[in-house]
Image: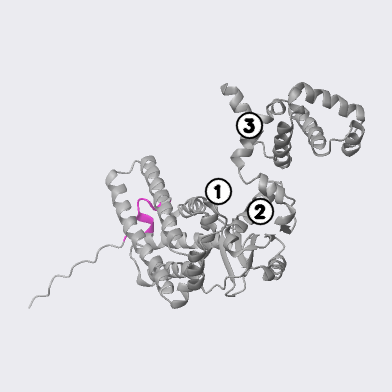
Amino acid sequence: MTDSPVLAPEPVISLSSHPFRPVLLKMADPIVAQVRAEVPAYAGPDGGRRHQLMLMAANAAVEGYLDTSRRHSAQRKVDVLFHRMGWGEAESGNTTDNLEAALGVASRAAWRHLCDYAVAKGLTAKALRDVTLDLLEYADHLRAELLAGHALRADRPQFEGQRARQELLRFFRTASAGRVSPLAPLGVDRTRLADLAERAGWPVPDQTVALAVSFHGDSPDVPDRSDVLWARDGQRLQVLCAAPLAGELAGQFERSGSDRRVVISWPVPAAESGTAMLWTIRALDLVQAGVIPPTPVVRCDEHVTQLWLHAEPSMRRRLCQDLLEPLLAEAPNSREILTETLLVWLETRDSAPAIAAKLDIHPQTVRYRWRRLNELFGEALRDPEFILQMTLVLKASVPMWKGGDQSDFELFRDTRDLGV
């Protein structure tokens, strides 16, 4: 009896023999950077916990792919990691939207790197096609692990409540953002609100307060209470609670880290909660722009005028270009001192000596500046409607200019150069 022929095992391709190995091993960092740039939920600070987790996952995926022997134990570690990441998204009450978006960005970025490398090294179209198909199959496998982990957590009963709470917050935000007409009623549809609140287990209070918290690194903890709604958006936390609870929560957030900034709205009817949430986010943006002082706790009721004036950025910019054209055409130093003098006069209508005392300059200097302002604006300075509009535009724009925003001047120069 003769022995059956023994088939030689397929040779295992070593890590060093893969034609795209050099570019694959360098791909994790740029892909993660691209995902963080295009998917806001995955941005966060450099070196933060989320950034480190993404780098770990990307490097593990690359190493798992290059290990073409596909050892069960090695690949299993990669699978478990991606499964847990999907679970974590569901645990945070998130849908799979961000996961899907990140996978799409990563796939496109990987394809660009592979193509560039193939061209630079003179690799064949067949080699590029083969590695692309293989990587797509591998990416589908990792996607399945992510979605399986998410589904496993999402299928649990308590996730339904979390998902309903996130839906309620989105309802507030989108309903308020869509209100563009002064004829539209304030607030949201109360029947829809009652339905969503019941599903979310959220007792609708008479009045609510919105809070927004900016942070670096890990997000501050939010009390696990049925009457507190919250969502994380990048390095910001949005919270909605009953009005009596707001002070306690604000104190907890402020004490949770030295890098925290807490913005608090004034109380509003529950149906107008989305508007209050918009105010708090706008206030954080205005702190970043240098318009609102960067105090640890920012109270919206102390900055009502700026919140109102900056509600329509494009309108402010248009009025600035129309009303302040003579000032924008001045040299930077002249523009600064003339604007300073004009704004004090608009706010006080004081005499030259009184304005000089406020600015700590000589009264004759004020008179010189006033003559120049009359040369620039002429009779318009005696038009009540023009004065009102100019006052509002300057009050909105000057803090931005002092904060370093040059966009008004750049737009003026570009428009002038184009002859528009």
Choose mark 3 or mark 1, whichever is in front.
1
Q: Earlier in the sequence, mark 3 or mark 1?
A: 1
Q: In the rendered image of this protein, does residue 353 appear above or below residue 160? A: above
Q: Residue 234: which quarter of the image?
A: bottom right
Q: Earlier in the sequence, mark 3 or mark 2?
A: 2
Mark 3 in CB contact with mark 2 (< 8 angstroms): no
Q: Amino acid at mark 2?
A: Leu
- Write the residue at 25% across / 63% down: 10
Where is mark 3, residue-wise?
A: 410
Outermost residue, left side: 1
Mark 1, Cα crowd under 10 Å, few <14 / some 14-19 / many 20+, is few
Q: Amino acid at mark 1?
A: Leu
Mark 3: secondary structure: helix
State the separation of the CA atoms marked 3 and 1. Answer: 35 Å
224 sits to left or right of 299? left
| Residue 344 locus on image (x, y percent) | 82, 37
Q: Residue 353 bears which disc, if any?
A: none
* Residue 56 makes an appearance in the image: yes
Query: For this rendering, which residue is in front, 91 or 420?
Result: 420
177 sits to left or right of 364? left
Q: Residue 284 bears which disc, if any?
A: 2
85 sits to left or right of 227? left
- For the C terminus, the quadrant is top right
- Write the residue at 56% across / 64% down: 231
Q: Amino acid at mark 3?
A: Glu
Where is mark 1, residue-wise?
A: 183
Q: Which portion, as a residue range, is magenta? A: 13-22
